[in-house]
Image (spheres, rainbow, N blue to C red):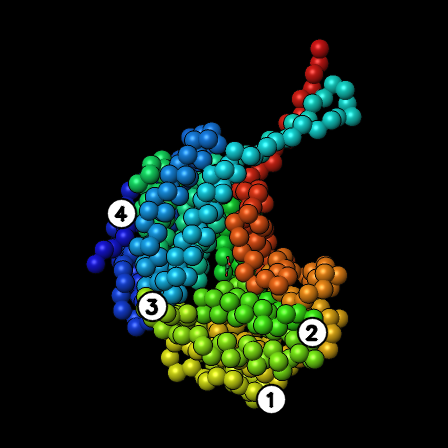
Amino acid sequence: MHTFGVYIDGEWQQTPNILKVMNPVDNSTVGNVAKAGENEALAAVHAAQQALDSWSVTTAYERANLLKLWYEAIEQEKIDIAKTLTMEQGKPLKEAISEIDYANQFILWYAEEAKRVYGETIPSLDKSKRIIVNKKPIGVVAAITPWNFPAAMITRKVSPALAAGCTVVIKPSELTPLTAYRLVLLADKVGFPKGVINIVTGDPIKIGDIWLNDKRVRKITFTGSTPVGKYLMKGASYTVKKVSLELGGHAPTIVLKDADLDFAAETILAGKFRNAGQTCVCPNRIYVQKEVVEKFIDIFSKKAKKLVVGNGLDEGVDMGPLISDQAVHKVIKQVQDAVDKGATLIGELPGSRMVKPIILTNVNNEMRCMNEETFGPLAPIMSIEDEEEAIRLANNSEYGLAAYVFTSHLEKAFKLSEALEYGIVGINDTLPSIVQAPFGGMKQSGIGREGGHHGLDEFLEIQYVSMKLHS
Ligand code: SIN
């Protein structure tokens, strides 16, 4: 079985230890990667710093050309990379293929956007002065990515960084590194200069600490849990690094009585059970206006029952396994807590990682499932009076990533989206992630935005030049 080495300064290097990558379906080994330690983490930064001088002064057109070649190389191998993704992460192959498409769109988008990094000239009060604003690459970027989107979270960070003229050190999750290594292998093949992209995997704390403490790393971009995000933010303060953090979410989903219920149920189902509920933006707490709650539950639960759970490589599977036993345990705990407090369970408690959709009704806001992120296929449905109550409950959270509203009333759509303290609001839409738009959260869901032109700004410094004309 192939063992990916770490990739540093354009070389694939083995290390004394390896990390086995397991299939969450049955714990079989699907591949190995070299286990990086502190030396490799440091060497990666060194290589990225060395490469920065020449990469940061390439033209946007040169960078765009390489990004496009990378995009084309991924496009050619996409089915095969998607199979790797399914085997290490669990999601159904059709979803893995969509993720590779989504991931690759970031590369194409930022190849184009690289050419649109415009500066400014600003009229001065002083006749003899000229004010010029330049944008410059921030420097070496450390990208730390999660297991739930092993391809898209890499390209969402790395392609704008490269487009901006930054060099990168990447640490994918040790649970799902193979997809990331395959992407980097293709970047190597299409000719990115050595040191521009480096990738290592290993003990996350050791590697993270090396990068946090190294003053040559000028930016940390991370997707993962809120506690880890806080740790990185604190650590980044010692060398005053810029941070972008895409953290947890607990998306409220409001269904008003004027909504098209069949459409709402279908759309919420698609968002809730995507990736077996293991996304930061999936509908997590569903608030339905009391007049239509029974009807909604009936439609939603009938649709949910039809979803097929199994090995993501098998035909006709809608949901794969959860990533770990710990993830299953968290779902069980939330269900038990809710049932103890009076909820009704539609479905069954899981006995393995193959967790079928679970619906909870007669839910109230005291239950854990309404207050903490789930990361599993659990859909609690609570009856609410009106939109005022919906807004109050939705905003009563430390999270502020995504929120959803289902209504056919234009004015209500506007009113609710303006009142919700969330970085992303989907109106009759639970799949808002798209490369052209800024993805990110308010409150403890994070800092910064990824995607769109906003995502490029995160990797740029602003420099103001004041010029005095003295003749
Ligand atoms: C995430 O769960 O962190 C990302 C989801 C997405 O991009 O849709």
Q: Of helix, strand and loop, which one carries label 3?
A: loop
- Give the alpha-carbon distance from disc 3 to disc 1, as whole Å: 38 Å
Q: Of helix, strand and loop, which one carries label 4?
A: strand
Sequence-earlier tag: 1 or 2: 2
* Residue highlighted by disc 1: 342
* Residue highlighted by disc 3: 315
Q: Give amino acid for label 2.
A: Lys
Sequence-earlier tag: 1 or 4: 4
Label 1: few (<14), some (14–19) or many (≥20) C-alpha neighbours in 10 Å:
some
Question: Which residue occupies 49% across, 41% down?
Answer: 110
- Give the alpha-carbon distance from disc 4 to disc 2, as whole Å: 60 Å
| Of residues 207 and 13, the one drawn nearer to the viewer in this rendering | 13
Is 270 rendered above or below residue 112?
below
Determine if residue 311 is in view. yes
Percent from the top left, x then y, of residue 357? 47, 77
- State left or right for residue 216 relative to residue 467: left
